[in-house]
Amino acid sequence: MPFSKLFQRLNETDEGAMRVVFLAAAGIGAAVALQKVVRQIDSLVVPRRRFRVRHGNGPAGVNFTSKTTYTVLGTSAPPTLADIPTLVTEMRDAFESGVTLPLANRLETLVAMKKMFVENEQRILRAVWEDLRRPEGETLYYDFLLVKTEIQNLITNLHKWTKPERVSKFSLLTFPSSQWVEKDAFGTVLIIGPFNYPFALTARVVAGAVAGGNNVVLKPSNDVPFSSNLLRELFVKYVDPRVVTVVGPHIAGDGVDVVTSLMRQKLDFVFFTGSSRVGAIIAKQAAETLTPIALELGGKNPVFVDETADLSLAAKQCVWGRTLNCGQQCVAPEFVLVHRSVLEKFLEQARRWTHELVPDPYLEGAMGRLVGWNASASSAGDDDKNNAADDSDGNTSGRKSAAMRVKQLLDVAPAGKHGEKIVVGGGADFSRGVVEPTVVVCGWDSPLMREEMFAPVLCVVPYDDLEDATRMVRTRPKPLALYVFSKHKKNTRHILDNTTSGGVTINGVLFHVGHTGLPFGGVGESGAGSYHGEASVKCFTHQKPTLRKWRDLHDFGVLTDPFFVYGPHDRVKRTLLRAVAERS
């Protein structure tokens, strides 16, 4: 007798309905046991990945062979503004060919990128020195070692981070089944880089996109012409242009037209590092074509120093974090909220550590300089408005705008119209791009507290009540980073639970950004999306849920095709649906 007719007869009496429920309960128990067996069997049967391969194409490499003849991609001449539509079209064709998808090709590109860094360490250090006069130790770590380590981590973990991720959670509704998450490459990706870390915030991002199986159009900042030109030269030399192509450094103009033209093309993903204001413009342009984006922006990052903190350590960390790269980094501490009872002691330590860490800021190599410090650099490249005018977080539009903006900030402090008081510093030589490390006590209403400064100016705001301080932080745009100095666990917990930020370091600054196991990204006005390590692979791939129903168990459809999912739904079917739903 067919099962459907059997259950129909059982449904004719209340006793029959109870039998159905009993049978259903027994079936659920058997299903759970069977699912475990099926899962073990299924785990042994992993379908081999079969990425598309266009006939006639060779493997990835600088000297590639392709069935398709490209007119812009891979040519010796750098792309012009007029070439951009054709370039993007050819990059999309290259992705369609499948050259970026096989793990062997991804690995080959990542190995080539690592080799690119290893063999050109001194050239990279020199280029950043010419652009920003940053101390070599800072550049070595942030623009070289961090990038090389990231690439190596991607090489080491490429298979693990890109393989389909099995989902073991049991669901009675879909039983029997196996399910997993595929990690699909988006396609052709546009990466727009800033000036402040010209290699870390470009090549590191590119490596994540490549690991995810994408190909990349990279637009570096023209505000650092030596670095951007070197980036293009190295990628041309070491990496298959079908995988990574650099555009912009050789195009005359301010850069706005370059990014505008790129954003008009059909892209599969956009990764932008810059200010919140320009990020909003990029997001609006991407929304017009429904292009997914990741935004790594900035903000005014707060530091909490309570009455239990190690004041010497807190002051040293804040001064150090604020003076790195002449204060031109999106995760730098912007203002310090200090409990009023320890304010003077903190200021004393801040003064001390400022003199110890940067005794003479005017000495070449003592501290980085404002972007565009050397007017002669403009001969190697034009201003980069790709990231917009008066961009305060890594993409200034004019070489004079950074100096003018910082000068306006420093002019505010001596006036003291809002209670500002300079504790140390305050001087500058804008003709050389030098700004003294400056500590200013001010109030919430000071002009210094309105926008991200992107300069070595540290504001100190006293507070009396921690709850009031966290409330004031919540009224402001969400920052990219937040820092806490405290020995009091309850105070630390209160700050974590009552503020929102992209990331947090406790009893230090910046360190959460350098940990290879932690994602880095903003929230709200400070960004969307995150990357670094495995998070980079997730950032540049679509997490595609996939479920395979088991149909070959010879169970007459009792488990594999249960009758009660189909209408019309009588009382028995509704009872079974409820039972299944509650256990799924």
Image (cartoon, helix red, strand yellow):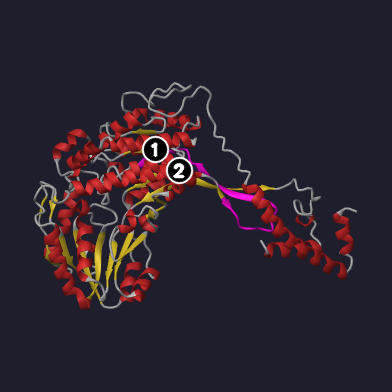
Amino acid, disc 1: Leu
Residue 152, quarter of picture: top left
Over which residues does the magenta segment extend? Answer: 166-192
Horizontal placement of 200 versus 325: left or right?
Answer: right
Distance (Cα) linking label 2 and label 1 = 10 Å
* Percent position of residue 262, x then y: 38, 36
User: Dot 1: few (<14), some (14–19), or many (≥20) neighbours within 10 Å?
Assistant: many
- Three-letter residue code for mark 2: Leu
Residue 39's x, y, as percent?
Answer: 65, 52
Report how many numbered discs are placed on residues in the image.
2
Q: Name the residue under label 2.
A: 158
Judging depth in this view, the residue of 537 and 115 nearest the camera is 115
Residue at the location (17% across, 54% down)? 406
Can residue 225 be seen from the camera position used here? no
The residue depicted at 36 percent of the width and 28 percent of the height is: 83
Q: Is residue 179 visible?
A: yes
- Quarter that holds the N terminus: bottom right
- Identify the image quadrant of residue 334: bottom left
Q: Which of 401 and 494 is in front in this view?
A: 494
The residue under label 1 is 110
The quadrant of the rendering that contains the C terminus is bottom right
Q: Hey, which quadrant is residue 570 in on the image?
A: bottom right
Residue 471 against residue 477 in the figure, above or below: below
Tell me which label, 2 or 1, sits earlier in the chain: 1
Q: Against 540, is 55 above or below?
A: above
Left or right relative to 202: residue 107: right
Q: SS at mark 1?
A: helix
Which residue is rendered at x = 36% and y = 76% of the image?
Answer: 490
